[in-house]
Amino acid sequence: MNTTFLLSATEQGVAWGDFIFYIVTFLILLALVKKFAWTPITDMMEKRATKISNDIDSAEQARQKAEELVEKRDLALKNSRSEASQIIDRAKKNGEQQKANIVSSAHEEVQTMKANAKKDIQQERQEALDSVKNDVAELSIEIASKIIRKELTADDQKALVDSYIEGLGKQNETR
């Protein structure tokens, strides 16, 4: 067809009817391409560009949220470490305080036990001395009464025994 048009245009002049037909057909073809091909393709491209733009924005927001979460996690980790360190320090202080309390109470208990033991020893010693004094006094009285029964009076015997007991008491106190 084109060949005929070109031949006819060169041999006889321009065939305006065919030319207009071709232009109208070309314009109709352009309109059809625009309506059925170009517009859907450009719409599809715009939708795709919008989707890509939205995806990029969403990815940027997700990245920012991830960075915020990382910062929060790091802060929480630092706080946890700090809190753990404080707990350990408090536990050490409490342990040291309990140790000091235990040592102090043990020391006080030992001192109390020593004082009680000294008191018990002193009491036992005094009881033993009193018992020995009584035994010695009785024994001395018996011996003295047998030996001196006829020569001393009862008051003289008692004075003699008392002085002897006092002498024994002074000897035991110096020990």
Image (cartoon, rainbow, N blue to C red):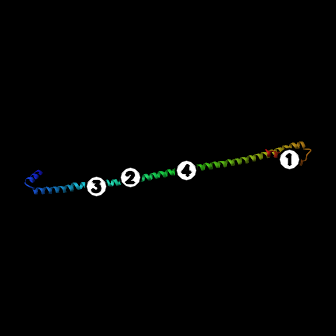
Instruction: Classify mark 4: residues with Cα within 10 Å, few (<14), some (14-19) or many (20+).
Output: few
- Horizontal and vertical percent position of residue 91: 56, 50
Amino acid under disc 4 = Asp
Mark 3 to mark 4 CA distance (whole Å): 62 Å
Residue designated by label 1: 163
Mark 2 to mark 4 CA distance (whole Å): 39 Å
CB contact under 8 Å: marks 3 and 2:
no
| Residue ID at (69%, 48%) | 111
- Horizontal and vertical percent position of residue 29: 17, 55
Residue designated by label 3: 47
Amino acid under disc 2 = Arg
Residue designated by label 2: 63
Residue designated by label 4: 89
**Mark toward the start of the polypeptide (3 vs 4):** 3
Mark 1 to mark 3 CA distance (whole Å): 132 Å
From the viewer's perspective, is 166 left or right of 74?
right
Nearest-to-viewer mark from 2 and 4 = 2
Q: Is residue 131 visible?
A: no
Nearest-to-viewer mark from 2 and 1 = 2
Q: How many marks?
A: 4
**Mark toward the start of the polypeptide (3 vs 2):** 3
| Residue ID at (89%, 48%) | 156
Q: Secondary structure at mark 1?
A: helix
Amino acid under disc 1 = Ser
Instruction: Classify mark 3: residues with Cα within 10 Å, few (<14), some (14-19) or many (20+).
Output: few
Amino acid under disc 3 = Lys
Q: Secondary structure at mark 3?
A: helix
Q: Secondary structure at mark 4?
A: helix
Mark 4 to mark 1 CA distance (whole Å): 72 Å
CB contact under 8 Å: marks 3 and 4:
no
